Image (spheres, coloured by chain):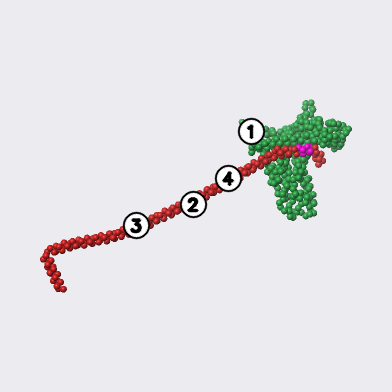
Chain colours: A red, B green
Amino acid sequence: METLLNDFSPGLFVVSTILMLALIALMVKFAWKPILSSLNEREEGIQSALDAAEKAKREMANLQADNERLLQEARLERETMLKEARELKTKMIADAEEEAKTQANKMITQAQEAIVSEKKAAMAELKSHVAGLSLDIAEKVVRNELSNKDKQLELVESMLGEATLN
Amino acid sequence: MKIVKQSFKFLVLAVLMFLPTSILAINAGGDGGQISGKQEVEEYIVHHLKDSHDFNLFSYTDDAGERQHFGVALPVILWSSEGLVTFMSSEFHHDDNGQVIVEKDGLKFTKIHSKIYELEKGATAVEFDADHHATNASKVLDFSITKSVIGILLIGLLMLFWFSRLAKQYKKKQIPTGFGRILEPLVLYVRDEIARPNIGEKHYRKFTGYLLTVFFFIWILNLAGLTPLGFNVTGQLAVTACLAIFTLIIYTISGNKDYWMHILWMPGVPIFVKPILAVIELVGAFIIKPFSLLVRLFANISAGHIVLMSLIAIMFTLKESLGVVGATSLSFVLSFFLLLIELLVAFLQAYIFTMLSALFIGMAVAEHNHEHDHEVSSDVEDVRGDFI
């Protein structure tokens, strides 16, 4: 301890105190202040750049989500449209079928009616024709019969004979 | 070609590593002639640990048997009984035992064990008592530009040069180039690993400048102490005391209400304990803390120098039992490994000093947001716990 105290040099203490004070002041002014402020600035710059990147990433993600949503919507829409179209198609086919059927039925009925009426007309015509023919034949037969006067008289005689009986 | 270049680099590195030991070995040639005995080695080491009034690089004995010294004489500045006296240290002719008397302005000065004494009026030679203390001379206030002062100046200028250049680099570009690229992470290290966690986010900016200065100052001076220049600045009590007192002043000035409250009137303890605690806390704040700082640095660096020089001295002390080659190689190997450890210690001591300074400052500026009801746990230890 005594040697330690003996070794302690007050002069050196004073000189080193003065030098240290000067060194600290000079270092703070010319080195640490500019260095630390530049480092801070740089760190803030890096931080803000990172933040900006993060923000851009988030925006990108948002955009992507939007895109996804839009795509999803479009897909859904397409789906519904396709479904509607399919339904429409089946409905149209069904309608057409229905209509065709009714039309056909109607036509069939009409045809049937026409056939019936045609048939009737034909029948009537046929009847009248047959009647005409029958009359002609009858006429011819009658004429033929009547050409023979004896026979006619004989007949009238017979008929009269019958009538007088009555 | 590449291999040649690499092996050349390795060679340079190896030489640089061994250089301190080899040149200190030359240096160990000593002031008073060749050193061989254990007693002389011990004396030489003690002499080296002290501050020196001249910057001696090496000494040798020439053909005529004269002791020649190679180095630079430094100015001696004294505050004597009759005011300021200055002369060059070369006037002592490398004497360190009070043999050479320098007369200036009618006053007589002599140098004994690196301390300058002023002889009493009328005395012509120094008289020693049985313990080798001078009886007719007294110490003077010595403001000389000693070897340590030269060391502080050199390292201070070096730091100013390096870091102001780094500061200038930031004006032009965001990322420093060259040597600045080595310095920047060190600055960041001190700021982010020492200042910020110990002092706290809110206050650390104010103290970072001091902590950075102290860290680099101690570290570079510790490293300079391992070079052949043989500085022992951080092994000078005066220098470590100066640094410790700076820290003491800073944390005393910046201490807030809570800090003083915890020292003078500890909350949360019975009233009769408070004065006792106040005494303990005051002793802790004003004596134990600065002493722990100054003694730790001084003792570590001095011990490193003593052991390193003792290992180098193996060359002389074991010369007879191991032979010249054996003693020299043993000394080289041991001192090489010790040098590696000392490189670590140089950093570690700078780190510990800065770290503890930051911790003490942090304790002084810490803000307590918890209420002190009657909790015993809310003492300084708690604050310490918050910051470690």
Looking at the rendered image, the quarter that the N terminus of chain A falls into is top right
Q: CA distance from mark 2 to mark 3?
A: 41 Å
Q: Residue at x 79, y 49 (%)?
A: B279
Q: Residues within 10 Å of mark 3 (few under 14, many from 20)?
A: few
* B258 is within the stretch colored magenta: no
Amino acid type of the residue that numbered disc 1 sits on in the rendered structure: Gln
Labels 2 & 3 near each other (Cβ < 8 A) = no
User: Compared with residue A112, is residue B40 higher up or lower down, i.e. above or below?
Assistant: above
Amino acid type of the residue that numbered disc 4 sits on in the rendered structure: Ala
Amino acid type of the residue that numbered disc 3 sits on in the rendered structure: Ala
- Most common secondary structure along the magenta stretch: helix
Q: Secondary structure at mark 1?
A: helix
What residue is disc 2 on? A76
Q: Residue A56: which numbered mark, if any?
A: 4
Q: Residues within 10 Å of mark 1 (few under 14, many from 20)?
A: few
Say which of marks 1 and 4 sits in front: 4
